[in-house]
Structures are given as C-alpha cells and as structure tokens.
Amino acid sequence: MTETESTYVKALTDVIEGYIKRLRRDISSGFDDATISEVFVNIEDICSFHAKLHHKLLDCDSDHKLVAKLFIENIDKLAKMYIDFCSAFPKSLEKLEELHGVDPTEVLWLNVSLN
C-alpha cells in the first residue's frame, strides 16, 4: 500500500510541477490563477494530503489495524476532496476545450500515448 501511495503522490507532483507551476510562470499561457483553479481543481490539496498520508502509512509499519484506523480517521477529508474534484471535473474539461478548441480527452489520450 505504501508503494502505491508513493507512486500516486509522485504522479500528482508531476502534474503540479509539469503543468500547474509552469502555467503560473508563463503569463502568455492564458492560465491565470482562477483558470488554473478551474482546470486543476484541488489537485494541490489532494497531493499534500496524500503525501502526509503516505508518511503516516509508513509509520503504521504494515499493521492492518493501524492502517484501518488511519483511513477511518481521514475518511471525511478524503470524501470531501474527491467529491469536490469529481464534481468539478466536467467543468474542468469544458474549460480546457474552451481555451484550446480541442477535445481535452484527445489531449489526455495523446499525452498518455506519447509517454
């Protein structure tokens, strides 16, 4: 479980470093803070939460009871973060399409295909 969590945090960090931070630096991108928030929703909060969760999972040392307790203690936070993200996702895709005139699912497919 800790390896999966570590991989997930790395993937989220890659999105933040590779897209969000670059877009914030590149004023000509057309992505102001409001647009970045609309497109990427709460990915930075999700990443921060999962990074902390990963460290706490390591502290659990594979003790199933401690892992269960950790998730029970954080279920409300997890639910809220992902409800917010999933609820905003369709609008995020629409915003990408509006900004670039391209179906964002095609861009995502191409990006995955090239990697």
Image: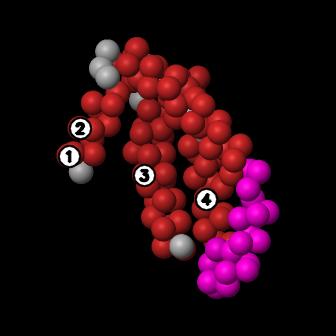
Task: Report which quarter residue 82 is drawn in.
Answer: top right
Q: What's the amino acid at mark 3? A: Asp
Q: Secondary structure at mark 2?
A: helix
Residue placed at 29% from the left, 32% from the top? 107
Q: CA distance from mark 4 to mark 2?
A: 27 Å
Residue type at tag 2: Leu
Q: Which mark is residue 114?
A: 1
Viewer-side label of 3, 1: 1
Q: Which residue is mark 4?
A: 50
Q: Which residue is drawn at the image coordinates 79% and 63% (left, top)?
A: 73
In the rendered image, the vertical position of residue 26 relative to residue 100, given as above or below: below
| Mark 1: secondary structure | helix
Residue 5, percent from left and from top: 53, 66
Dots 4, 2 in contact, CB < 8 A:
no
Determine if the magenta segment contains residue 9: no
Label 3 sits on a secondary structure element that is helix
User: Between residues 13 and 21, which one lies in front from this camera angle?
Assistant: 13
Predominant SS of the magenta segment: helix
Location of mark 2 (residue): 110
Check if residue 69 falls in the magenta segment. yes
The residue that label 3 is drawn on is 14
Work out whether residue 108 can be spotted: yes
Q: Give the CA distance from mark 4 to mark 1.
A: 27 Å
Q: Is residue 25 visible?
A: no
Residues shaded magenta: 57-77
Q: Find residue 15 and name its label.
A: none
Mark 2 Cα within 10 Å, few/some/many (few <14, many 20+)?
few
Give the residue type that dot 1 points to.
Leu
Please tell me which of labels 4 and 2 falls first in the chain: 4
Mark with earlier residue (3, 1): 3
What is the crowding at mark 4: few (fewer than 14 residues within 10 Å), some, or many (at least 20)?
Answer: many
